[in-house]
């Protein structure tokens, strides 16, 4: 599952499936891999209320492996 984590991947948490998270940048900061994510509603019409947040890449991988989140779109 870790190989899917790249720029353009969209995932959603199981507790909030109507909020999509699109990875827009992956980088390393102080030895930790980080992902900048654009967070928006499930429909493209809701993309105007998007906000940018940052996750640890390991955190995203952990949630996907444990079934706490799922991939919506992998490019």
Image (cartoon, helix red, strand yellow):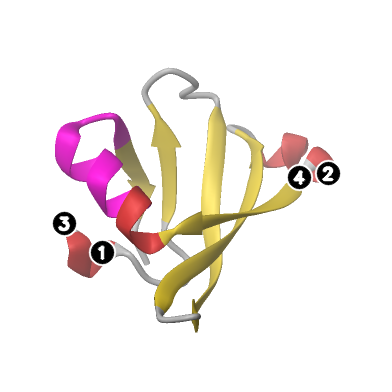
To which quarter of the image does residue 12 belong?
Answer: top left
Secondary element under disc 2, as helix, strand or loop, is helix
Q: CA distance from mark 1 to mark 2?
A: 26 Å
Residue located beneath label 1 in the image? 4
Residue drawn at x 50%, y 65% is: 35
Is the residue marked by circle 3 packed among few (<14), some (14-19), or many (20+) residues within 10 Å?
few
Residue located beneath label 4 in the image? 50
Residue drawn at x 41%, y 81% is: 31
Q: Are marks 4 and 2 in contact (CB under 8 Å)?
A: yes
Q: CA distance from mark 1 to mark 4?
A: 22 Å
Is the residue marked by circle 4 packed among few (<14), some (14-19), or many (20+) residues within 10 Å?
some
The mark total stands at 4
Dot 2 or dot 3: first in sequence order is: 3
Q: Is residue 71 magenta?
A: no
Residue located beneath label 2 in the image? 48
Q: CA distance from mark 4 to mark 2?
A: 6 Å
Q: Residue furthest front?
A: 30
Q: Would residue 67 be found to the left or right of residue 47 on screen?
A: left
- Magenta stretch: give its range: 60-69
Q: CA distance from mark 1 to mark 3?
A: 6 Å
Q: Position of residue 25 (x, y in %)?
A: 55, 74
Question: For the residues carrying marks 4 and 2, which lies nearer the camera in this image?
Answer: 4
To which quarter of the image does residue 22 belong?
Answer: bottom right
58, 64: nearer the viewer: 58
Secondary element under disc 4, as helix, strand or loop, is loop
User: Residue 43, labelled with which disc?
Assistant: none
Compared to residue 57, the image places residue 33 above or below, namely below
Q: CA distance from mark 2 to mark 3?
A: 30 Å
Secondary element under disc 1, as helix, strand or loop, is helix
Residue located beneath label 3 in the image? 1
Q: Are marks 1 and 2 in contact (CB under 8 Å)?
A: no
Compared to residue 54, the image places residue 71 above or below, namely above
């Amino acid at each position: 599952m870790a190989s899917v984590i790249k720029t353009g991947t969209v995932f959603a948490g199981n507790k909030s499936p109507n909020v999509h998270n699109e990875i827009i940048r992956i980088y390393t900061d102080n030895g930790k891999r980080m992902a900048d994510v654009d967070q928006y509603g499930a429909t493209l019409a809701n993309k105007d209320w998007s906000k940018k947040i940052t996750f640890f890449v390991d955190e995203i991988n952990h949630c996907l492996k444990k079934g706490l989140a799922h991939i919506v779109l992998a490019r």
